[in-house]
Image: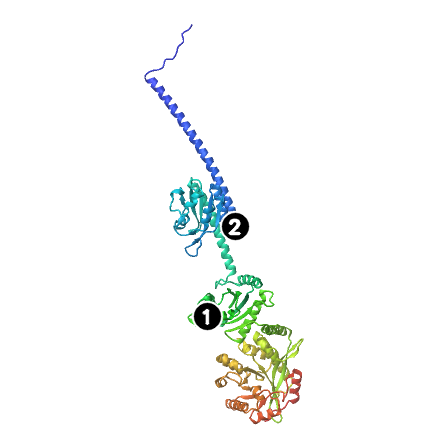
Amino acid sequence: MKHMVFPVPETGAAGERADERIDSLRHLLERERKARIEAEAVAERSWRDLYENQVRLALLQRITDASNQSSDFKAALGIALAEICAHMNWDVGHAYRIDLEGKARRQARITYAAEPDRFRPIMDASRRQILQDGEDLPGRVLRDRHPHWIDQMVEDKWFPRRDLALESGLQSACAFPVLVGEELVAVMEFFSRRPLVDKDNILLTVTQASTQLARVVERERARTALLHEARHDAMTGLPNRVLLDERARAAFARLQRSGKDLAMMVIDLDGFKAVNDKHGHHAGDALLIEVARRFNRVVAGLRGKTGWPGPSPRITLARVGGDEFVMLLDMLTDRRLPEFLANRLLVALREPMPIDGELVAVGASIGIAHGGGDYTSIEQIRRDADLAMYEAKGAGRDRIVTFTDALGSDVRRRMALERELREAIRENQFLLFYQPIFCLGDTPYLLGFEALIRWAHPTRGTLSPDAFIPAAEASGLIVFIGDWVMRQACTALARLHRLLPAHNRPFVSVNIAPQQFLQPDFTQSVRRAIADSGLPPRCLKLEVTEGVAIIDAARTRAVLEEIRAWGVQTSLDDFGTGYSSLSYLKNLPFDSLKIDRSFTASIDDPKSRDIIQTILDLAGKLGLTVVAEGIESSEQDRMLQSMGCTFGQGFHLAPPLEETAAFALAAAEAPTPPA
C-alpha cells in the first residue's frame, strides 16, 4: 500500500494570508447580500410608489374629469370629498365655501360620510359651523392659508368638536386650503378613525386635487363674468335689455298667481342730445353714468325714513339703449307707488350735473303702464308704457303720464296716421291748392297765392292740413312735407308765369314749419327750389311763425337776410297770436306780416278792432305790408279797408283752388296794376 500524502496546514505568515483571503471573501459575500437586499427593497419601494402614484393619478383623473364636466364648484367639491375619503380610507369630509362678503364664512353644506348614521352628530355640528379666522381646525386654515393636522383627537382640547368626534370613534383630523392664486376659496376638512400616516403623500394628493378644484372656480367665475357682461350695461352697470326681458317675463308669469300688480316705467331723458352735441359723446357717457347713479339712489332710498311707507316691490332698473331707461316693478301692492317713484326720479335730476367744467341739467319724460287687464304678454305692457312716455314727451319737459285705454286709442290712431303719412310721401298722395291773395278795394285784383297742402287720402278722401299736419310735426315728417310744398309751389308758379304776360306774374306764399326752418341746410333747400323751377326769387314769399323767431333770434336773422339778398320775400305769419315781442319784429328782416284769422273773425269786438288797428299802425311805421287772413264776409272786408288794411285773403274773396282753377283765375284777370 502506497503512502498517502495529506496537506499540512500552513503555519506562520502563509496561514495568516489564507485567513485574510477568507475574511475578504466573507465580507464580499456580505456586501453582495446587503446590496441584493437593498436592491430588492428599492425595487419593492419603486413598485409600491408606482402603484401609489397610479392610484393617486386615477383619483386625480376622476376628480379632474368631474371638474371638467362641471361649472358648479359646489358639485365639484362634493365629488372631491367623496373621492378623497375613499382613497385615503377616511370616514367624514366637509367643505366650507368662503363667503367674500365680510369676515364671516359659511359652510357650503357639502358633506361626505362612509356611514352617515354613525357620524350624524359630527356632521350636523359641522354644517352649523361658521368659519372665523383662527377658530377651530378650518378656521386655522382660513387664517394661515396652509394645512393643519390633529394627530390625536383626545389630546387636542382646543378643538371645539372634539367630544362629538370622539363619541363617533374618530381619532384624527386634517384640513386643507383650496387656493386660486393667493385667494382662499374653500377649506376641506376630513376625519378618520385611524391615525394619519404618510403626511407627505396626503399633502401631495390633496394639494393636486385642490388645484383641479381651483380651476373649476376660475371657470365658474369666467362664466359668471360673461353672463354678467351679456346681461348688464357696460357703461352704467345696470341690467340691460336681456336681463330686463328675463325678469319681466318671469314677473308676468307670476302676475296671475300672486294676485299682485306689476308696472313698467319707461324713462327717456330730455335734453340729452343737446349735451352730446355740445360737449361730445364722452360727456354724454359721463352724464348717463351720473343719471344711473342717481336713479339707483332713489330706488335704494325707497325704504328710508322719507321713502314709501308701504311694502316695496321687486324693482329692476335697466338701461335699454341711448338715453332710455326702463324700471320694472314686480309684486306691486299699491298702484300709487310707480307715480310716487317717478316723481322722485324727476326730483333727482333737478340738481345740475358737472360735465366738462359746466353744470348741465337734464329732465325726463316718464311713461307708466300697469299689468293686469287684457294683457296677454309683457311686451304689450312695455309697448303701452312706451306710448305713455311719448305722450309725456309731447306734452313738454319733466312730465309723467300713466297709460289709459283712452290714451292708447288716441296714440295708436296717431301712430297709424304717421304710418299713413310715410306711405303718402312715398306714393306722392299730396297735392296743392292755391288761395288767392288780393289787393282790397271796390275792384280787388289778384296779387298772388298762398300754397295750401291737401292730402288725397286713398280711403278718407281729400284731407285738410288740420287733419294731419300736427302728426307730421310730432313725427318730424313735416320737414319732408314742407320741402315738397316749397318745390311743388315754385314749379307750379314758374309754369303759370310762362302763360302770363311779363307784367302780370303773381307771387306764391309758402308756409315754413319751425322744424323745417331750423334745418341746417334750409337756405340750400330754398336755393335749390328756386334754381330747379326757374321761378324768379321775388315771386317767392316765405311765411314763418313767431315761434321760429324766438328759438334762435340770431340765426333767424342771418337766414332771413341771406334769402332776402336773393330777392325772396319774407313774412311773419299769425302775428299777435304767438310769443314775440315788438323787438323781434323791429330787428328781424320781414317784408310783411299777416293778421291772424282769429282777429278778423272777431272784428265786431272793439278789442279785436283795437288790436288790428295797432298792428296796422305799427306795420306802417316799420314799412311792412299787412295781409289779413280769413275774410269771410263783405262787412269784414269793408271794415278792414276802412282801417287801412290793403291786402287780404279769405272765402269772401276766393276759396283755395286747385291748380287748374287758380291758373284760370290768374289768366282771366291779367289786370294792369293801377298807377
* Residue 639 versus residue 33 in the image, above or below: below
Q: Where is residue 630 in the image (x, y as percent from the top left)?
A: 60, 87
**Helix, strand or loop at mark 2:** loop
> How many numbered discs?
2
Q: Which residue lies furthest to the top in this view?
A: 1
Q: Marks 2 and 1: CB-CB under 8 Å?
A: no
Decide if residue 594 is on the left or right side of residue 213.
Answer: right
Out of 327 and 443, give the one closest to the viewer. Answer: 327
Looking at the rendered image, the quarter that the C terminus falls into is: bottom right
Q: Where is residue 374 in the image (x, y as percent from the top left)?
A: 61, 68
Q: Where is residue 453 in the image (x, y as percent from the top left)?
A: 62, 80
Out of 382 and 91, give the one closest to the viewer. Answer: 91
Looking at the rendered image, the quarter that the N terminus falls into is: top left
The residue to which callout 2 is attached is: 70
* Residue 444 versus residue 473 in the image, above or below: below
Q: What residue type is labelled 2?
A: Ser
Q: How crowded is mark 1: few (under 14 residues within 10 Å), some or many (20 or more)?
A: some
* Residue 159 versus residue 259 in the image, above or below: above
Q: What scheme was used to colour the molecule?
A: rainbow
Q: What residue type is labelled 1?
A: Ala
**Helix, strand or loop at mark 1:** helix
Decide if residue 340 is on the left or right side of residue 424.
Answer: left
- Whether residue 78 is visible here, answered yes or no, is yes
What number is the disc on residue 316?
none
**Precedes in sequence: disc 2 or disc 1:** 2
What number is the disc on residue 348?
1
Out of 441 and 39, give the one closest to the viewer. Answer: 39
Out of 70 and 450, give the one closest to the viewer. Answer: 70
Marks 2 and 1, how far apart at CA: 45 Å
Q: How crowded is mark 2: few (under 14 residues within 10 Å), some or many (20 or more)?
A: some
- Whether residue 532 is visible here, answered yes or no, is no
Q: Position of residue 228 (x, y in %)?
A: 50, 59
